[in-house]
Image (cartoon, rainbow, N blue to C red):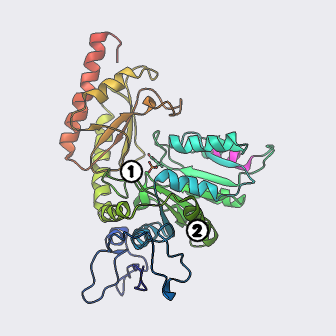
Amino acid sequence: MTDAPSPSAPEPPSGAPDRLAPATVVVTAGRPPRAPGAPVNPPVELSSTYAAWPAELGRTGYGRSQNATWDAFEGVVGELEGGAALVFASGMAAIAAALSVAPADRPILAPTTPYNATSALLEEYACAGRDVRRAPVDDTGAFLAALAGSGRPGGPAGTVWLESPTNPLLQVADLPTLISAAHHHGAVVICDNTFATPLLQRPLAWGADMVVHSVTKYLAGHSDLLLGATVTHPDRGDLHEALVTHRTRHGAIAGPMETWLALRGIRTLQVRFERAAANAAELARRLAGHPAVARVRWPGSGAMLAVDVAGDPDDPEPADRVVAALRLWNAATSLGGVESLGERRRRYPGESPLVPESLLRLSVGIEDIEDLWRDLDQALQAAVRSARVFGSGT
Ligand SMILES: Cc1ncc(COP(=O)(O)O)c(C=O)c1O
């Protein structure tokens, strides 16, 4: 890195509100300063070390702690969420970092069914002797009771982990209420905002201390990389510094090339997400009347859906048959890309037993809605037909 000015946050035009709209931020943030002959896009900075000029004082001059492409991407994500962003090698690297800087001497409260790898990581904490509590995040009363921990040896929780909507049950939390109650008990609040994205909710604006993302999903948007991010509240510079130290020492850093691709991907976040969410809304409406569907789980916004295939919730077969019959949708894990994906979540041994065997998780992409519907409909109908042939009913 030279002493050239780093990527700047965009300024609102004169006469506009203080904050630019997200659709503008995704396009304009993290660009090089405007100067005659300056490039419009930041470069992929491929360097493991940096010349130790005086301008570098205060930074180590080594690629495990600094990179100009990170700066550009972090500028966009920070501006969108309203805090200070750090990019990590994956969503799980960001989540591990976030948990590691939370208070170590007080209980952790988390949703009963968060993303399964987050759940497994929390179990590791529990096995190591930490008090890790679970409560349904969509049951505000139960979650608040677990937070207060009255009569429990550890007292109130010191870290509150939130994920809303949850993966894959799409449970929605009352974030403002839970965040303010957590602060009343002096807890640090961390929210996984991967499914909603900052386009739908900004937990830091409701007072959360930190947001985490699997950048792999909507922010990058093309299923071609893995990355993660943390974003800390402007008042939590202490947490930001602790995360910088964690990233530098543990070394789960983002590759500059992946970061640049994610930066390119995030430029179209608003249009991709709007289109995918509109497709999801229409599919949710049509699926609700489908004879092969027992239940549609859609939180009313966003582009993730889940359906419980009709029949015995403990029987994986009908859902497996639907997945096998998909032609346009890809039968694959992950989410948030431009292409539509579907999978039966309980195929993972690590998935919660509270997730029905019959649940299909659908990540709705930006393809034509009629093409998506035709394919999903024929796959569901095929499952109904083969159930009749094999006599297991629907
Ligand atoms: C909600 C949520 N958070 C975090 C992660 C982990 O992200 P990554 O796969 O980038 O490590 C995932 C991955 O599916 C996820 O769905």
Of residues 239 and 290, the one nearer the viewer is: 239
User: Where residue 25 appears, x then y in whole percent?
Assistant: 36, 72
The number of numbered badges drawn on the structure is 2
Q: How many residues crowd around disc 2 within 10 Å: few (fewer than 14), some, or many (20 or more)?
A: many
Which residue lies most toward the bottom here? 36
Marker disc for residue 119: none
Q: Which residues are magenta?
A: 143-149
Please tell me whether residue 144 belongs to the stretch shown in magenta. yes
Q: Main secondary structure of the magenta part?
A: helix
CA–CA distance in space, label 1 to label 2: 30 Å
Residue 308 lies, with reference to residue 24, above or below; the image says above
Residue 41 lies, with reference to residue 120, above or below; the image says below
Quarter assignment of residue 176: bottom right
Q: Secondary structure at mark 1?
A: loop
Residue for badge 1 = 301
User: Where residue 114 appears, x then y in whole percent?
Assistant: 53, 43
Residue 388 falls left or right of residue 104 = left
Looking at marks 1 and 2 on the same chain, the residue that comes earlier in the sequence is marked by 2
Q: Quadrant of the N terminus?
A: bottom left
Asked if residue 291 shows in the view, the reply is no
Residue at (45% x, 40% y) in the render: 168
Please tell me whether residue 286 belongs to the stretch shown in magenta. no
Amino acid at pointer 2: His
Residue for badge 2 = 240
Residue at (37% x, 54% y) in the render: 218
Quarter assignment of residue 197: bottom left
User: Where residue 291 appears, x then y in whole percent?
Assistant: 30, 25
Amino acid at pointer 1: Ser
Residue 180 falls left or right of residue 192 = right
